[in-house]
Image (cartoon, rainbow, N blue to C red):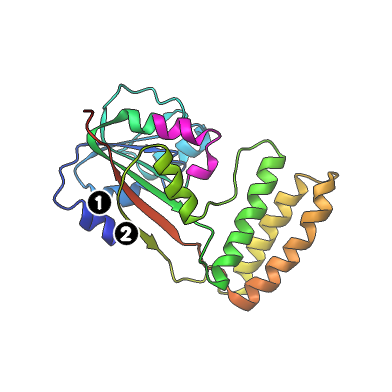
């Protein structure tokens, strides 16, 4: 995330909100980028927040939905949302709330995996993610497939969120370097599939596990590309 750190190196930031913080996966990036800022993380899932608090005891975590942020207007210098856009049931409402709580001329940071222009190993990751997201939807959890880069940019244009800067981040690592790593991923898929046993989708999804295994052995399993976007809120005329 060096481009992000470099972008903000001369910008004074005191208060940050991390929306959809989950287990706090983006907090370490925020701490490196804004070492002196106070950070608050919000997420609707209490178990995730408990894990986040264990990892970052100096950060405040609050159970809260992105679409209903319980903060005053213009409260934060920076609001971030990482790997969570595709989890929001109402993206337009969530972006509107994020925009509301950012100070005039404050910043919004979006970090989201994308589904296009991936190499073969990244396509294996996308397959794994989409398998999981489909089962989540079938079991009542809101979990979209990943967006394309253009779809995210268009989403922000509609929300009148002017993009200042963006870059793509790739991690050139293979997450299934040995048989044990691959077996762990395959077992996770099998456990997920058991959640919908007896439903018609079970037979449709079952062959994807072996397809995943074959492709992971051939190409590897590399994280999909992240699109990192910096937006600056306009001052009202």
Picture coordinates of residue 2, whole percent (x, y): 27, 61
Q: Which residue is mark 1?
A: 33
Indicate the secondary structure of the residue bearing disc 2.
loop
Q: Main secondary structure of the magenta part?
A: helix
Looking at the rendering, the stretch of residues picked out in magenta corresponds to 84-96
CB atoms of marks 1 and 2 within 8 Å: yes
> Which image quarter holds the N terminus?
bottom left
Q: Is residue 220 left or right of residue 35?
A: right
The vertical placement of 37 against 115, above or below, is: above
Picture coordinates of residue 105, whole percent (x, y): 21, 37
Looking at the image, the residue that sits furthest to the bottom is 218
The answer, for residue 113, to whether it is visible in the render is no
Picture coordinates of residue 232, whole percent (x, y): 27, 42
Q: Is residue 107 left or right of residue 184?
A: left
In the image, 27 versus 91, the foreground residue is 91
User: Which of the labelled discs sits on residue 232, or is there none?
Assistant: none
Picture coordinates of residue 164, whole percent (x, y): 28, 49
Q: Quadrant of residue 68?
A: top left
Indicate the secondary structure of the residue bearing disc 1.
helix
Q: Quadrant of residue 17?
A: top left
Q: Which residue is mark 2?
A: 1
- Measuring 39% from the left and 62% from the top, which residue is drawn there? 169
Q: Is residue 204 left or right of residue 48?
A: right
Question: Does the magenta run of residues contain 87?
Answer: yes
Question: Does the magenta run of residues contain 118?
Answer: no
């Amino acid at each position: 995330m060096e481009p992000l750190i470099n972008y903000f190196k001369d910008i004074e930031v005191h208060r940050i909100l991390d929306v959809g913080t989950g287990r706090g996966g983006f907090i370490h990036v925020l701490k490196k980028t804004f070492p002196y800022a106070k950070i608050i993380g919000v997420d609707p899932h209490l178990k995730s927040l408990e894990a986040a608090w264990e990892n970052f005891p100096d950060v405040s975590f609050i159970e809260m939905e992105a679409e209903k942020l319980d903060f005053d207007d213009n409260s934060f210098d920076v609001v971030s949302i990482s790997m969570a856009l595709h989890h929001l049931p109402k993206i337009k409402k969530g972006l509107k709330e994020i925009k509301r709580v950012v100070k005039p001329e404050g910043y919004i940071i979006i970090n989201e995996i994308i589904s296009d222009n991936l190499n073969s190993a990244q396509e294996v990751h996308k397959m794994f993610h989409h398998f999981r997201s489909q089962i989540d939807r079938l079991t009542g959890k809101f979990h979209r497939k990943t967006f394309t880069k253009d779809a995210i940019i268009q989403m922000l244009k509609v929300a009148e969120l002017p993009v200042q800067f963006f870059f793509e981040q790739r991690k050139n690592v293979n997450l299934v370097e040995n048989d044990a790593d691959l077996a762990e991923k395959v077992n996770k898929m099998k456990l997920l599939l058991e959640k919908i046993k007896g439903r018609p989708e079970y037979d449709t999804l079952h062959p994807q596990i072996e397809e995943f295994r074959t492709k992971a052995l051939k190409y590897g399993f590399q994280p999909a590309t992240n699109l990192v976007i910096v937006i600056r809120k306009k001052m009202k005329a």
